[in-house]
Image: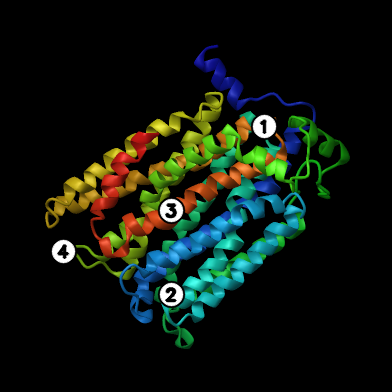
Amino acid sequence: MTTRSRLREYFHAEYQPGERKLVQKIDFFILTFCCLSYFTNYLDRSNLNNAYVSGMKEDLGFVGDQLNQINTCFTIGYVIGQIPANLSLHYVKPRYFFPACMLVWAGLTMVTASARNPQSIMAIRFFQGVAEATTFVGTHYILGSWYTERELGKRSGIFTASGLAGTMIGGFIQTGIHSSLDGRNGLRGWRWLFIMDGIITLPVALYGFLFFPDTPTTTGAFYLTESEKALAVSRVPPVEDRTPVSWTFFKNSFSSWFFWGFVVLWIIAGETESFSSNALMALYMKSHPTTKYSVPQLNNYPTGVPAVGIVSTLFWATLTDFLSGKRYLVGYFIGITGVATSAMILAASKDPTNPASTSVVFGAYYWAGAVYACQATFFAWANDALRYEDHMFRAIVLAGMNLGSNAVNAWWSIVFYGASMAPWFIVSHYASDYAPQTR
């Protein structure tokens, strides 16, 4: 088949009668809720870093690597919640479970505004991690339940891009809040940021409670006809649906090569990605050897990192769909990117006061944002490979991938990305040079 005919087939896919309308409906109701949920989720995560460089560090008396310790507390809660959260989707309808978790993390986000020391934020972020554990892996489980293999990559990419949009827009929101609300009613701008984050989350939770369609076999969505519900079930392979609470289930799951293969894959890829996800660019600017950046600059300039991530994610998600699911190609790309960008920053650190050094570092961090592409493609890869497996086994593998990556990241960020290591993070860049090559 020629490239031209493959492009025509890809962009003009043939559907069964009524299938195109069904896909449009589930695209609207699933993707709008999941993307808005993930957007607010990442808005919250990124705005901790935005608050840190916007006065929280000085107001609460942060010392050493306490910012990293807070992120580790969040990660520990996040890791603990992964598998229980995904298994809960077998017993509690997603349209109840997802919004309930959102209400919890919205409340905890607003409570962060009252913090008086870094230790209280550590406790709050631990429980936020537990509440937010279902968003990423739970959504990938839902996407794999509704979409066919040719549809999955793009939807996974759109979902992942929404989280990156939260990271990107968070910087601009903090800039706006800092300029308009700083000092209002006696509260610093960074405290208003957490209050506004929580408020933004509440209507999204309500939307999910009213409109989220659950899974094809359990949906009671009023906007789907009975024929559309039957068609949704027929679009995905029929698999045996077993109750997972048994020692045999867990034994078989944790001894499967599917489980360990994808878990190890995402541990490696996740740490390559952590080069961009630990706010290194903002910390570099905050501790720049010659230039003192303003609060708007500290919040706005790093937004280019997730912006590149959005473009890269959508490009690779679409390309690997077009290439019939060759998701592994992204591994080569992020390996090359990790090595090259680390080498650029290490070279720039040799002459830190040279203006060209700053340009090289900015370029490296922006390019490094492209590694975010592995999120959508690797989780779509797992969904593709497990399409004919038990639903709850697929849920376990997806949760295990994120559990493994975040379990490593809980200590990895302290060892290699400590705030006290700014501006150059020399050890972390040597680690990035070697980690991708193990892929």
Dot 3 or dot 4: first in sequence order is 4
> Going by the picture, which residue comes out furthest to the bottom?
186
At x 55%, y 27%, the residue is 325
At x 71%, y 41%, the residue is 249
Dot 1 or dot 3: first in sequence order is 1
Given residues 83 and 154, the one toward you in this image is: 83
Give, as a three-letter code, the residue at label 2. Answer: Trp
Rendering quarter of residue 96: bottom right
Label 3 near label 2: C-beta < 8 Å? no
Query: Counting other residues with Cα less than 10 Å from the Cα at mark 3, is it few (<14), some (14-19), or many (20 or more)?
Result: many
Q: Is residue 244 left or right of residue 325?
A: right
| C-alpha separation, residue under disc 1 versus residue under disc 3 | 28 Å
Q: Which is more foreground, mark 2 or mark 3?
A: 3
Label 2 near label 4: C-beta < 8 Å? no
Q: Which mark is residue 190?
A: 2
| C-alpha separation, residue under disc 4 versus residue under disc 1 | 54 Å
Q: Which mark is residue 387?
A: 1
Q: How many marks?
A: 4
Query: Counting other residues with Cα less than 10 Å from the Cα at mark 4, is it few (<14), some (14-19), or many (20 or more)?
Result: few
Secondary structure under tag 1 reads: loop
Q: Which mark is residue 409?
A: 3
Given residues 120 and 411, the one toward you in this image is: 411
Dot 4 or dot 1: first in sequence order is 4
Q: Is residue 265 above or below residue 14?
A: below
Residue with the mark numbered 4: 290
Secondary structure under tag 2 reads: helix
Label 1 near label 4: C-beta < 8 Å? no
Dot 2 or dot 3: first in sequence order is 2
At x 74%, y 55%, the residue is 95
Secondary structure under tag 4 reads: loop
| C-alpha separation, residue under disc 3 versus residue under disc 4 | 31 Å
